[in-house]
Image (tube, rainbow, N blue to C red):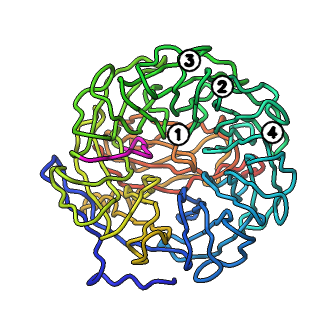
């Protein structure tokens, strides 16, 4: 790595407060980059317990090789302790920036972002900026790439693999031609693209009104449809209920892109959503930033706050919470945790936040809540310059991986490195360790069922896909149970066992429909 992290000179400033539980300790941290900026990385878990990151890099030294000019997609694959296994620079001679990455069911990776290039690795640019999608194998070799757009500007913000093996993408479009066949209703519209497994366009749709609409997050839902989060400044066409300035705009689609419902959430000032996830009750959790203190928003602390919104399965507001201090706090990512609560992160200038002491400009801020949004713990991480968190995931050991970019590491204003932090998981006592060691999971790989034996009383068994989405969860009182896995596609999953809300076991579960057992 280019920079040696010396804790006596630059500390991870993590201040836990007096909420209901102690924040987890920092297990390790790593930074990656060269002498020019590396920015806006997304992070995802991999099936071997490691991590995949994708953002942008302008460097040609340090950890970065193969830059094509200006900024490239920069993809970094690490092991479970953050050591680089491989890295790839992908792009052309103009600007290219990745925004979203996930491991795919074949062990490879799908990456989406924005490209202005039409050379190097990039072909088929339509003009301006295009959505650019790359499919990599497990070693990072390029399998295929696709430029999608029209003669103006398009950008991708989120990509996910779908249950049919294809891909769904959300971003924005400003064109009326090329691949944007549905046309743009305003300056910028939500643009949703469905690809098959080899990158062939199956359908695309634009959604919005006469002004700017930006989609930042998409997830496939349990009914086969899609939930999309972002923000809208429109007050016409299909956008209804705007409260003033920009609102959170959440739309629900069926499997073919038909709008089922839409919801504008906010107050009279600017409110912008950046992450939406389906929750275990079939509803949705949304995080972003709000400057409002009226309309749907209450409890503001000053300037921008993290604004967490819980919706029902039909988009009705169930509850909302604001978190922050007297300056600005901007939420970027949220996920439901194994205990039914929520973990979120973003950027904060942490003044007057209980339990924190600001020493720098912008810090990572992590907030952990219970199922109703009440704070359980929070921490800030950073140094004397800027640190911006972009993504957080719960890991299979019950801990968390936190991702963003920092100039405090490089001690050079404007020169950022990717910076990831691993927080510890649950600490098991001797009795829990004995239980864990006795549990058996078989067969693994599985086809249509998996059996778990030697369970303690009152366990909850959950199965997650590699994007962190909970696809199965059920409570059991039996010592031996069988779970039907016939509806799962071939691939790698995480099987998690909780004993009285504490994770006692997380194991990889392999589904292989091509395997036969004697």
Give the magenta range.
327-338
Residue at x 46%, y 60% (from the top left corner): 403
Q: Give yes or no for contact between labels 2 and 1 (Cβ–Cβ under 8 Å).
A: no
Q: Nearer the viewer, mark 3 or mark 1?
A: 3
Which circle's residue, 2 or 1, is located before the other in the chain? 2
> How much space separates mark 2 and mark 1, taking CA atoms?
52 Å
Numbered disc in front, either 2 or 3:
2
Mark 4 and mark 3 residues within 8 Å of each other at the beta carbon:
no
From the image, tell me which residue sits under label 2. 186
Disc 1 vs disc 4: Cβ atoms closer than 8 Å? no
Which residue is label 1 attached to? 482
Residue designated by label 4: 150
For the point 51% across and 84% down, the residue is 2
Mark toward the start of the polypeptide (2 vs 3): 2
Mark number displayed over residue 239:
3
Q: Which comes sooner in the sequence, label 1 or label 4?
A: 4
**Residue 305: image location, x then y, percent:** 31, 40
């Amino acid at each position: 790595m280019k920079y040696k992290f010396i804790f006596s000179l630059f500390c991870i400033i993590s201040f836990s407060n007096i909420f209901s539980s102690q924040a987890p300790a920092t297990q390790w941290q790593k930074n990656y980059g060269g002498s020019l900026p590396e920015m806006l990385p997304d992070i995802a878990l991999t099936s071997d317990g490691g991590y995949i990151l994708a953002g942008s890099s302008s460097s040609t030294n340090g950890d970065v090789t193969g830059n094509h000019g200006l900024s490239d997609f920069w993809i970094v694959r690490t092991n479970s302790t953050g050591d680089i296994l491989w890295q790839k620079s992908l792009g052309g001679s103009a600007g290219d920036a990745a925004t979203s990455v996930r491991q795919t069911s074949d062990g490879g990776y799908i990456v989406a972002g924005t490209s202005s290039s039409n050379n190097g690795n990039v072909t088929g640019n339509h003009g301006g900026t295009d959505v650019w999608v790359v499919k990599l194998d497990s070693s990072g070799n390029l399998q295929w790439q696709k430029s999608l757009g029209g003669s103006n500007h398009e950008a991708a913000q989120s990509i996910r693999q779908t249950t049919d093996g294809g891909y769904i993408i959300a971003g924005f479009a400003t064109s009326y031609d090329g691949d944007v066949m549905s046309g743009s209703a305003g300056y910028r519209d939500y643009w949703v693209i469905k690809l098959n497994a080899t990158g062939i366009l199956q359908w695309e749709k634009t959604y919005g009104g006469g002004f700017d609409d930006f989609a930042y997050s998409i997830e496939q839902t349990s009914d086969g449809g899609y939930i999309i989060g972002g923000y809208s400044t429109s007050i016409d066409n299909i956008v209804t209920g705007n409260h003033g300035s920009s609102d959170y705009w959440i739309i629900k689609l069926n499997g073919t892109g038909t709008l089922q419902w839409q919801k504008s959430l906010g107050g009279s000032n600017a409110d912008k959503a950046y992450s939406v996830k389906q929750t275990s009750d079939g509803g949705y959790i949304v995080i972003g930033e709000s400057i409002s203190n009226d309309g749907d928003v209450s409890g503001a602390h000053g300037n921008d706050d993290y604004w967490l919104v819980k919706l029902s399965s039909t988009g009705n507001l169930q509850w909302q919470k604001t978190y922050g201090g007297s300056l600005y706090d901007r939420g970027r990512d949220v996920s439901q945790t194994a205990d039914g609560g929520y973990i979120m992160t973003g950027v904060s200038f942490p003044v007057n936040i209980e339990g924190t002491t600001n020493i720098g400009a912008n810090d990572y801020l992590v907030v952990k809540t219970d199922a109703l949004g009440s704070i359980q713990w929070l921490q800030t991480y950073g140094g004397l310059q800027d640190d911006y968190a972009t993504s957080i995931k719960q890991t299979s050991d019950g801990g968390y991986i936190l991702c963003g970019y920092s100039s405090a590491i490089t001690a050079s204003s404007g020169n950022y490195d990717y910076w990831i932090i691993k927080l510890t998981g649950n600490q098991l006592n001797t009795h829990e360790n004995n239980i864990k060691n006795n549990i058996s999971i078989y067969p693994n790989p599985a086809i249509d069922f998996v059996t778990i034996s030697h369970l303690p009383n009152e366990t909850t068994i959950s199965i997650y896909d590699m994007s962190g989405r909970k696809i199965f969860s059920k409570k059991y009182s039996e010592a031996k149970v069988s779970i039907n896995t016939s509806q799962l596609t071939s691939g790698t999953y995480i099987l998690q066992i909780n004993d009285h809300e504490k994770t006692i076991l997380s194991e990889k579960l392999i589904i292989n429909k091509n395997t036969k057992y004697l």
